[in-house]
Image: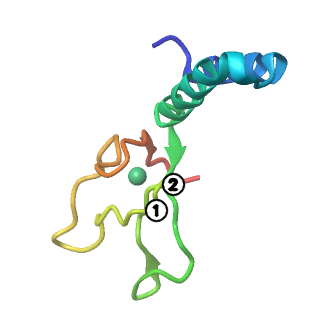
Amino acid sequence: MKDPVSSVSTIRNFMANAGRNTCNEYLYEALKDADEALQSQITKKIYHERWVGINGVPYDQCPRCKTNLCTAGKLGRKKENYCGTCGQKLDWEES
Ligand SMILES: [Zn+2]
């Protein structure tokens, strides 16, 4: 895959220009799927729900499906590059 960010923007520009009608319904749906699939390839920062966590330390959550990635504590899982639930590519860098 070249660059998911620019591919998504190309798809969205095309969809906006083409508009939606009965002739391109299938194409439109397919492009929406492609857009969604590409979204998961664009790295997103780990999400922290303010009120969810233990001892004031928020859980690491998937930025897309909000699944708790269970990295906290002794039995915590390792920090994977992709969410095991939705396949979102994850960015663990703290900003
Ligand atoms: Zn997820």
Local crowd size for mark 1, using a 10 Å CA cut-off: few (<14), some (14–19), many (≥20): some
Q: Residue at x 71, y 23 (%)?
A: 22
Q: Is residue 11 visible?
A: yes
Q: Is residue 5 found left or right of 40 in the rendered image? A: right
Q: Residue at x 64, y 24 (%)?
A: 25
Where residue 18 sits in the image (x, y, percent)?
79, 16
Where residue 58 sits in the image (x, y, percent)?
46, 75
Q: Is mark 2 within 8 Å of ligand 1?
A: yes
Q: Residue at x 30, y 70 (%)?
A: 72
- Residue 80 vs 70, above or below: the answer is above
Q: Is mark 1 within 8 Å of ligand 1?
A: yes
Q: CA distance from mark 1 to mark 2?
A: 6 Å
- Residue 7 vs 53, above or below: the answer is above
Element under disc 2: loop
User: Which is nearer the eye, 89 or 16?
Assistant: 16
User: Which is nearer the eye, 91 or 4?
Assistant: 4
Which quadrant of the structure image shows residue 16? top right
Where residue 15 sits in the image (x, y, percent)?
74, 22
Q: Are marks 1 and 2 in contact (CB under 8 Å)?
A: yes
Which quadrant of the structure image shows residue 4? top right
The image's colour scheme reads rainbow
Q: Which residue is mark 1?
A: 66
Element under disc 1: loop
Tag 2: amino acid: Pro
User: Which is nearer the eye, 66 or 21?
Assistant: 21
Where residue 69 sits in the image (x, y, percent)?
33, 61
Q: Which residue is mark 2?
A: 63
